[in-house]
Amino acid sequence: MSEIRKFKTESKRLLDLMINSIYTNREIFLRELISNASDAIDKYHYLSLTDDKLEKNKEYEILIIPDKDNRTITISDNGIGMTYDELNESLGTIAKSGSQEFIQKISNNNDEIDINIIGQFGVGFYSAFMVAKKVIVETRSPYSDKGYSFISEGEETYEINEIEKDDVGTKITLYLRSNTEDVDYDEFLEEYKIRRLVKKYSDYIRYPIKMLVSENEYDDAGNVVRTNKVWHTLNSMIPIWKKSKNEVSDEELNEFYKKKFFDYQDPLVSIYLNVEGQLTYSALIFIPKKPPFNLYSERYEKGLELYSKGVFIMEKCKELVPDYLRFIRGLVDSSDLPLNISREMLQHTKDIEKIANNLEKKVLSRLENMLKNEREKYIEFFENYGVNIKFGVYDQFGAKRDLLKDLLIFKTTNCDHYVTLAEYVEKMPENQQYIYYAQGKNKQTVLAMPQMDLIKKQGFDVLVLTDDVDEFALNMLEKYQDKPFKNITQGELDLLDQEEKEHIAKLEEEKKDLISKLKEILTGKIDDVKLSRRLVDSPVCLVSGEGVSLEMEKVISSLPHNEKVTATKILEINPNHELFKALETVYQNSPDELEMYADVLYSQALLMEGFTLENPMDFANKLSKLIIKSTK
Ligand code: ADP
């Protein structure tokens, strides 16, 4: 029997992609083929437990045979093999969801392929075409009397033939492409190269990966008398976390992470722990370079993989990870946990709690260390995950605040880099009592705020808060090294000297009629009108009383199902500004118009604070009237 069949469209696309790929990481083809072989052996083994037709206690192995003369490399396994139908289904179409998704992604990109995304997916069998111009698969399933071959040269069609094959399993022969100026495909025939690739990508595969190696026999004079072919096992078969720490290189850890968690970038941080003592366990923890795209969605599940004595128990053990570290990935293998542990039991297992606490400490101390010694890297971490740390400060009524406060960094108005709270406090001049902060898009927006007038004059630094959670976290902290936090748009700033204070108090007494008139006009909109003790150049500003700030009001009211909270709103007027004098004149000469002026001022203050106006038309009309009036 021999037939020619056509590839399914999406398979052909993937194939073309592999063939034309300028992908530099061609070497992963070996990893992909080995892991297919290992899966096939897993399947055989699993079925043999219940099916008497299959061999029990089979000696499983994966063989690699490089052949320099013919420029081929062959990978064979004694796993489950494929029947005729399976062969067509598996290799003629794309079976796996990962590959489907991959195709989807490249299709969405209108053929502009970001080659980096290849590594994100197990692209499996087709990756063979990154190095081969022709691939022959010979396979036999225990459920088929016959063996079949599949031959493809990466064209529209592939060929299937019936073949003689005595043993069950699959053998894949790659006919390497011709070398080019840029790529030396012969490299993949070299023993040292294959050894290295297996070590790097497939060391912890549970079955022996053997390579047929030439070994010379010498006579006493040192001449080669014979060359023997012998099998060498290339992989240690020990899961990476069962090795001792000094046996595991950073490169190995990174490769393990990428393979296991389908990432194409090295992790930002990897932590490897072997703990012995009251509790014995190993843990591998990674912080991905970029947060998973769904980290903040409700569907995201935090957790680490859990193993007991090397046997997999569950994929996401959430008890091992506090909420604020939900972005970490990794696994824990303990010899102290029962194998039959259930989800319900986990919550009551003291051991899990102890492991979780220890892991949390380890992650935090690694972060502290990074902050101290690798500032750039820490900033990268913080820009990606800082929100989570701030959330941790605020969460659980501040239970973790002391643990986390030194991990916070902020941009400030006086410098262009991040500072820690300790660094901020250290630089505070003696006459500065508070740690000032303001919410704003960036340093420039904060510097432009009217509430900054006096602070700028004093030269004090102000933390620039950019995330919604920031102010909630600082409120939870209350103070740092005995210095209370102070929102520059809230309460009194306390920056005037005695003489200035007395001056304003006196003015307030003198102008009390005007002030109470303004208050009356703005009743229902604001809670108070005051002469400002913080403005220098700006005419007015809106501030809030102690408690809920204006920003917090905005954040809370934007949350779904949240009870309404409102900040106490105070309109502050700069008594030294021309505008105040203008108001006085209006009040004296045409008191009826004061309402219009007051409304415009109030709306201005609202706009500067980033609130929306309830009635923008009204504001625009009033402003127009004033402009016209000013020209008459
Ligand atoms: P996957 O990511 O599913 O492994 P591949 O393209 O690598 O995708 O392989 C497609 C399918 O082909 C596999 O799911 C499996 O059913 C079959 N297959 C591939 N290699 C082997 C093999 N060595 N032995 C048996 N079946 C295999």
Image (cartoon, rainbow, N blue to C red):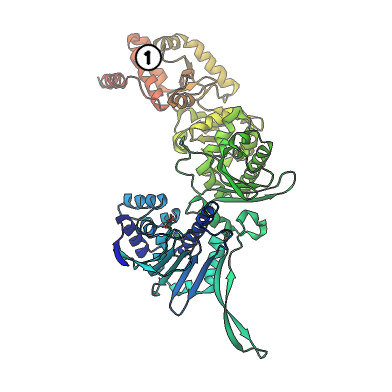
Q: Position of residue 61 (x, y in %)?
A: 55, 64
Q: Quadrant of the C terminus?
A: top left
Mark 1, residue position: 585
Residue 433 visible in the picture:
no
Q: Quadrant of the N terminus?
A: bottom left
Residue in front for this viewpoint, 164 or 571: 164
Residue in front for this viewpoint, 143 or 374: 143
Q: In the drawing, does residue 361 fall left or right of residue 173?
A: right
Q: Position of residue 278 (x, y in %)?
A: 74, 43
Residue in front for this viewpoint, 134 or 544: 134
Instruction: Name the quadrant where ligand 1 sits.
Output: bottom left
- Farthest residue toward the front? 52
- Farthest residue toward the right? 277
Residue 70 visible in the picture:
yes
Q: Residue at x 44, y 69 (%)?
A: 165
Q: In the drawing, does residue 624 fall left or right of residue 197?
A: left
* Mark 1 CB near ligand 1 (8 Å cut): no
Q: Is residue 453 above or below residue 19?
A: above
Query: What amino acid is at disc 1?
Result: Thr
Q: Residue at x 51, y 57 (%)?
A: 53
Q: How many residues crowd mark 1 within 10 Å: few (<14), some (14–19), many (20+)?
A: few
Q: Position of residue 57 (x, y in %)?
A: 59, 59
